[in-house]
Structures are given as C-alpha cells and as structure tokens.
Amino acid sequence: MSNNMRWRYGETNPVQLAVLAATTIEIGDLVYWDGTSLLPATSQADAGTKAQNQEAFHDAFAGVAMQAHRGGTDPAGSIRVATTGVFAFDSASATYKVGDLVGSAGTGSGGAVGVANQTVEAVATENLAVGRVAKAGASVTTVLVDIVATLSKGGPQAMA
C-alpha cells in the first residue's frame, strides 16, 4: 500500500514515536508499539486466529501514521502518529452504522499476515477494536472510523 493521507477531520492528538532504521511505515498505516519502537500492523507476529490477531493488535495500537519512514533509507528516528481523529479506511463491501466497532482487517493462522496496515472491518467486541464508525452507509468500501489509540489514550474499548 502506498502513502495515503487518511485523516478526514477531528483532533489528531499526535505523538512522536521511535522508528528503527530498517522499518518501513507509510502515511495512513495503522501502527503499534512493540515495547521499543513503532511498527506497521503487518509486522505483528501471527497470534493464531483472526480474533487473536486483532486482539493483539488492539492491545498495542498506537494510532495512524501521519508521516512515512522509508526503511533502509531513513535513519532511526521518530515519526508523528495520530492517536485520535476520524480517518477513511478501505473495507470489504459492508453496511455500517454509526458507533459500530471496527478493527484492523484480520486473517487467521497458517503464516498469513495477522492484520492489515490500511484496511478495516467490523468486529464483534471491544477488545478487537481500534475505533468506531463515524458515518453510516450501506455497501460501502471506504468507512470513516473515529480511532482512539489504546497505547496512549486507552481507546474507546476495554483492554483485554
């Protein structure tokens, strides 16, 4: 996925978080904190099931990248990450209501990527979510999501 400014409106409450020199992050990526540095969602190790992948991502969710970092080209440093705000994310065609829980699109086991960098889907419980739908729609493939980072803001959902 290429750099895509997904922010639409609302306060972003940005933070600067460390990124290692080898890490590639695109503008608009859902990112998480691994304890020492920022990583895009697809860097997360496969936790097993789709729900386990989404929950692991939720627990370390830092926000949405507002700056890019070119792995191998940019030196180690830090980038700006939005911890709140409304962002437009790609989604498989679905019907959303305002307030529906949304998480990073997930996959199950088998060595597949655990969660997606810039794609979301409806989730059933708060411990899988990174935000809530901000605009209703039927058969939409782009959904407006009011994100709240778990890492710094506690998110709109309870931590698992």
Image (tube, rainbow, N blue to C red):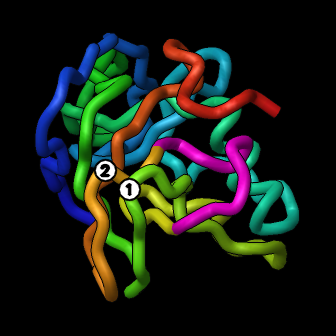
Determine which of the numbered discs, if any, sits on residue 115 in the image.
Answer: none
The quadrant in which the N terminus is found is: bottom left
**Looking at the image, which residue is at 30% across and 35% down?**
65
Q: Are marks 1 and 2 in contact (CB under 8 Å)?
A: yes
Q: CA distance from mark 1 to mark 2?
A: 5 Å
Check disc 2 and give the amino acid type: Ala
Q: Residue furthest right?
A: 48
x, y percent for residue 57: 65, 43
x, y percent for residue 97: 41, 65
Q: Nearer the viewer, residue 99 or 102?
A: 99
Q: Which residue is mark 2?
A: 134
> Does the segment drawn in magenta span residue 123?
yes
x, y percent for residue 4: 16, 55
Q: Is residue 87 above or below residue 116?
A: above
x, y percent for residue 149: 48, 27
Q: Nearer the viewer, residue 46 or 5?
A: 5
- What is the span of residues highlighted in magenta in the rendered image? 122-131
Q: Is residue 24 above or below residue 77?
A: below
Q: Which residue is mark 1?
A: 98
How packed is label 2: few (under 14 Cα within 10 Å), some, or many (20 or more)?
Answer: some
In the displayed structure image, the side of residue 68 where residue 139 appears, left or right: right
In the displayed structure image, the side of residue 160 where residue 94 appears, left or right: left
In the picture, residue 137 is in which quadrant? bottom left
> Does the segment drawn in magenta span residue 41?
no
